[in-house]
Structure formats: C-alpha cells, structure tokens
Amino acid sequence: FEDGINGEDVGNIEFVNGKFGKALKLDGSSYVKLPCDILPAPESFTISMWVYNQTADNALARLLSTGVFGPDTPGVTLGIHTNVTAAGNWGDITYGAGREGLEGYFDFSWAVDYNVVHENWFHVVLVCDAAESLIMVYVDGEEKDRITYAGCDIVSKMEVCALGGHLQDGEFYEGFTGLLDDVAIFDRALTPMEVVQVGSGKLLNTVKFESNGGSPVAL
C-alpha cells in the first residue's frame, strides 16, 4: 500500500484541522466507501486511526466495518460505544470478526473510561496477526485486549467496506459522528513499538480520500 488507498466520500464530509494536519469530519450519515479488498486477510493486517468521538451517548458507532456480518458473509468491525447510566458513565471499544453462527466468530467489547472516548482525541489500533491467530486492540499505545481467532473465516467473501459506519444490503447503519485522523491500513501486523510510533504521527501508509469534485486528501 505504498501509494495509499483510494476511498470515495459519501454524504456531507468536511476536511478540518485534526490531530495531525487535516482530519475527516463525519456527521453520522456520511462515510467513506473503501475497496472491498482493502484488508489482505487471511494474511496479517493492522488498522490504525486517531478518533475524536462526538456520537450521541448510548449509540453504537462503527469506525470501520467490512462484510455484512450475516451468516453468509464474514467481516471485520471496529467501533465505539459510549454509555451513560444512573450507575455511571463508561465507553466501549467494540471489535469482531468472522462469520456469524460459525466456529471462530466473535464480537467483543473492551470497557474504557468515558472521558477517554468522548470528545477527546484517542488513538485506536486493531492488529491481526495471522501467524499467531491473534487479534489485538491498542488504545493510546497500550494493548488492552486480545482474542484468538483460530478457525475464524474473516474476509474470504468480503463484499463491502466503510469507514465511519456499516453498509449492509444497500443501507447505512451505526454512523460515526466526529473526527478521524491519520487513518492507516497496513498489510502486516505492527509490533507494539510500531503501534506507538504510528500514534505519534509517523505514518508509513495513509488512506487517501477522493473529495467530490476535488483532489485526493491524505489524512
């Protein structure tokens, strides 16, 4: 991916000042449509981005979603969920992979402090290490969760891919409201040290978005 990955913006998208240079501003109904083969699975890959979440509380928002997550088509998803209750406020980083109903399918959440993921910049990374059958989630450079996915069919029939929401059967769901910056997809599993380096703004690969009527913008 040395030359970047081209994406098509859909809906009301703005390019504004972000964590490092320009960021993508989404309004909950806008998203970026990415190529179906953007993830090299079943080989290793890494998804990385800086996030400033403004999604309404108690609403699940997808940061990146592939496949349709039904019984016939596997996929990978990375999302965020802020919870406000009488007992207290907290957030979740959600992630999942596989074909629903079959061996190896999983859909997990890792709880995080509400103030980390609500109207505050944070760095989230999902690493898929095919050699070890591991998926790991990092927040602000620290590994927070990992799961073994042996036997999990991740993206062998991936049909759609969206940044900022979830596409299924021609409909858009669980849109993200806020800013995304330094979005990157790598065709290998980054090491813990590399995760920290990427979080510092030292990107090796960027996703480029074709703005309607304009030139590509690298985040």
Image (spheres, helix red, strand yellow):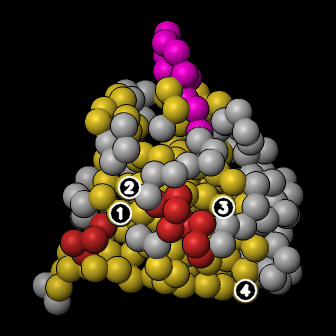
- Of label 1 and label 4, which has the lower sequence position? 1
Q: Callout 2, which amino acid?
A: Val
Q: Which residue is tagged 2? A: 51
Q: Is residue 50 left or right of residue 151?
A: left
Is residue 104 part of the magenta span, yes or no? no
Q: CA distance from mark 2 to mark 4?
A: 26 Å
Residue lying at 47% horizontally and 79% vertically, measured from the top left: 142
**Residue 55 appears anywhere in the view:** no
Residue lying at 52% horizontally and 81% vertically, measured from the top left: 143
- The image position of residue 6, as x and y in percent, is 65, 31
Marks 2 and 1 close (CB-CB < 8 Å):
yes
- The image position of residue 195, as x and y in percent, is 56, 67
- Of label 2 and label 3, which has the lower sequence position? 3
Q: Which residue is tagged 4? A: 148
Q: Which residue is tagged 3? A: 46
Q: Secondary structure at mark 2?
A: strand
Q: Callout 4, which amino acid?
A: Thr
Q: Which residue is tagged 1? A: 122
Q: Callout 1, which amino acid?
A: Phe
Q: CA distance from mark 1 to mark 4?
A: 25 Å
